Image (cartoon, rainbow, N blue to C red):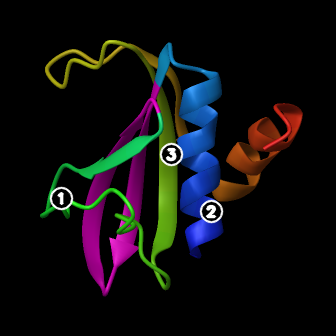
Amino acid sequence: MDDLMARRLEQYTIKRPQEVLIVKAEIDGESNKIVIFKGFSSSLTGATAFDPDVPVLPAGAKIVSIDRVASPYNPDSPRYLQQGLSWETMESLLSELGI
């Protein structure tokens, strides 16, 4: 995972504000869940830096899967558009939007 991948996911949610991305990732050997909405990332399972320039998905993170969820996100009853996308599948969606 590099910073460019994280920025591309954030750009996706800027272009599609009606969607929230839930990214399951492995960071330093630990499972982490990150929500990305309207260009901002926040960890659901760990701390998030106050500085938005500090990436939530650091270099070396491995994306396990990505879920596309309809906004507004309700963790008790999410409205999934697609679940369990691989990075390769998500990359196709990013390319379609020119990201």
Image quadrant occupied by the N terminus? bottom right
Magenta stretch holds residue 22: yes
Tell me the distance, in whole angstroms, between the alpha carbons under discs 1 and 3. Answer: 24 Å
- The disc, 1 or 3, on the residue closer to the chain's N-terminal end is 1
Across and down, in percent, residue 41 comes to 36, 48
Question: Within 10 Å of the Cα at label 1, are there few (<14), some (14-19), or many (20+) other Cα atoms?
Answer: few
Dominant SS in magenta: strand
Per the rendered image, the range of residues in magenta is: 20-38
The answer to whether residue 87 is left or right of residue 96 is: left
Tell me the distance, in whole angstroms, between the alpha carbons under discs 1 and 2. Answer: 20 Å
- The type of residue carrying mark 2 is Met
- The disc, 3 or 2, on the residue closer to the chain's N-terminal end is 2
Which residue carries the number 3 mark?
66
Q: Secondary structure at mark 3?
A: strand
Q: Which mark is residue 50?
A: 1
Q: Nearer the viewer, residue 93 or 13?
A: 13
User: Of discs 1 and 3, which sits in the foreground?
Assistant: 1
